[in-house]
Image (tube, rainbow, N blue to C red):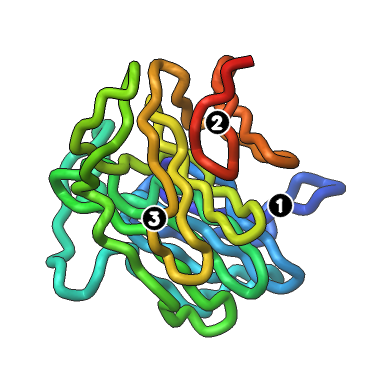
Amino acid sequence: PIDGSVRACDAATGQERWRFYTEGPVRFAPVLTKERVYAASDDGYLYCLLLADGTLVWKVRGAPDDQPDRRHLGNNRLVSHWPVRGGPVFADGCVYLAAGIWPTMGVYVLAVDAETGAVRWRNGKLTVIENVRLDHNAMETSGLSPQGYLLVHGDVLLVPNGRSLPAGLNRQTGELVYYIQGYRNGDCRVIAGDDVALVGEAGVVDLRTGREVGS
């Protein structure tokens, strides 16, 4: 909710069991495991809470420690310069997320140990990417703008990019595998299956190469 809270309600009665407040709007559904809740906030943090009562276990900032905790107005709320707008996904004991929207201000994709909150890797080299294929194979310098729920597909971490096509990162190292901006078929809504990803209403991407599928 835009009040910055994460809530648990009784499924039978709808009665609220607990509520935890972050310092910014929570724009993505939390990720649930058997005992924990992982929630991303516009305050720039990923929070790990106990599913039973909402107690904070740990929190991790998307931006690195050498970046001051800067805030500005976003949709009439005070939010981080690096809000977590790459929604978290859990796989193999790890939570993946992306912080930052504007490449000129810095964008970070990271993998966090789900048990301890320790950062396994953080890629901050995604703001300036040379030779990105645009329309008709034009090659330009571009950068990622994470927007939407991240997805795991085998060893590839898919990062939706709003109006651009999703980028693919190596899930073990965080290194960029492919990023093709594409032509008008980008969307924050991405689902993956078999060898393709469906992007919004019109985009289809080959998950092996990141290129659009013509038919």
116 on left or right of 125: right
Circles 1 and 3, Cβ within 8 Å, touching? The answer is no
Q: Amino acid at mark 2?
A: Arg
Determine which residue is flagged by label 3: 176
Residue visible at 40% across and 73% down in the picture: 121
Q: Amino acid at mark 3?
A: Leu
Determine which residue is flagged by label 1: 9
Q: Quadrant of the C terminus?
A: top right
Residue 141 is tagged as: none
191 on left or right of 82: right
In the rendered image, the vertical position of residue 123 relative to residue 182, given as above or below: below
- x, y percentage for residue 142? 22, 37
Asked which secondary structure carries label 3, the reply is strand
Determine which residue is flagged by label 2: 189
Residue 46 visible in rendering: yes
Circles 2 and 3, Cβ within 8 Å, touching? The answer is no
The quadrant holding residue 202 is: top right
